[in-house]
Image (cartoon, grey):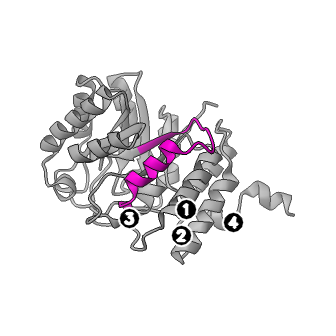
Amino acid sequence: MKAIKIHEVGLRDGLQMEEQVIPTKTKIKWAHQLIEAGLNIIQLGSFVHPKYVPQMADTDELFKYFATDADKPWTNLLSGLVLNERGLDRALECGVEMICTGVSASETHSRKNTRMSVDEALGRVLKIAGDAQAANKVVQLSVQSAFGCGYEGQIAEEQVLRIIGKYLDAGFNNFSLADTAGHADPNQVKRLFEKVFKLDSNLQLTAHFHNTYAMALANCVAAVESGVQTLESSFAGLGGCPFTSVAGGNVCTEDLVHMLHRMGYKIDIDLDLIITTAREASTMLNKELPGMIYKSGSIEKQMDNG
């Protein structure tokens, strides 16, 4: 079976909803564990104003640390979320390797998130993406609320395809479809990704699902079966968008990796290290988190222990 890449977003999308600010040294420790676990891409943070998202106040410091850290060489990509021109300047200054940016397919979600219409946000994002590409950075463009909106409900597939078409016309081919509100179902996922691939069969496609209505893992399987090469997830199932009506956590990394291992997909990832990180997060935040495997351990470990 084909190899599947994992883009770990727990340190950004996972923590942005948490009121308790995690110390930078703890984030560095968790990032090292996620890197060592073999996750292909790790998102360290987002370049937003700390007044609005205090949890991300140390994003620049984290990237500068890993840009100069010589203790362990690695091949994992380190990504950061950029929402505006100032954010891109900050990202370039501290050596971010992969720039993630994008727009919402929902007018309501777009205005709540960016105070701009979809088309206004699209113009800004394409300029940011072009500047990042000119700086020789890997660029991933997303379509948020691609499968539904917590405010508007169903989003027309033609709207999603229109945005992807604009990205393609601008010369990009690395895209993520995000289920920001958690409305996606497997049939919808398969249908929409197949339509996107019809626009260009050589696209690099990523899927980003939230487990708001308990369909995230099933949607991951549907995405992979449709040809998606990369899945985004968060350790312990942390996360949720602060600008949607009902915030649900991301698909859980250790649950996802465990499932893919069981299904026979080729992913060279150390599940135990991710479980360790999830358990440490649960202890640090002093609460039970949405993930399941960090509580039970893998089936293989359970069988080995009798």
The quadrant the N terminus occupies is top right
Alpha carbons under labels 3 and 4: distance apart:
29 Å
Alpha carbons under labels 1 and 2: distance apart:
6 Å
Could you say where residue 200 lies in the image, as x and y percent from the top left?
A: 35, 22
Using the image, determine if residue 180 lies above or below residue 284: above
Marks 4,2: beta carbons within 8 A: no
**Nearer mark to the viewer, of 3 and 4:** 3
Q: Which quarter of the figure has residue 48?
A: bottom left
**Nearer mark to the viewer, of 4 and 2:** 2
> Mark 3 — residue?
55
Question: Which mark, residue 296?
Answer: 4
> Mark 1 — residue?
236
Using the image, determine if residue 125 lies above or below residue 249: above
Alpha carbons under labels 2 and 3: distance apart:
18 Å
Of the pair 187 and 27, the residue shown nearer to us: 27
Could you say where residue 249 lies in the image, as x and y percent from the top left?
A: 44, 62
Which amino acid does the dot numbered 3 rest on?
Gln
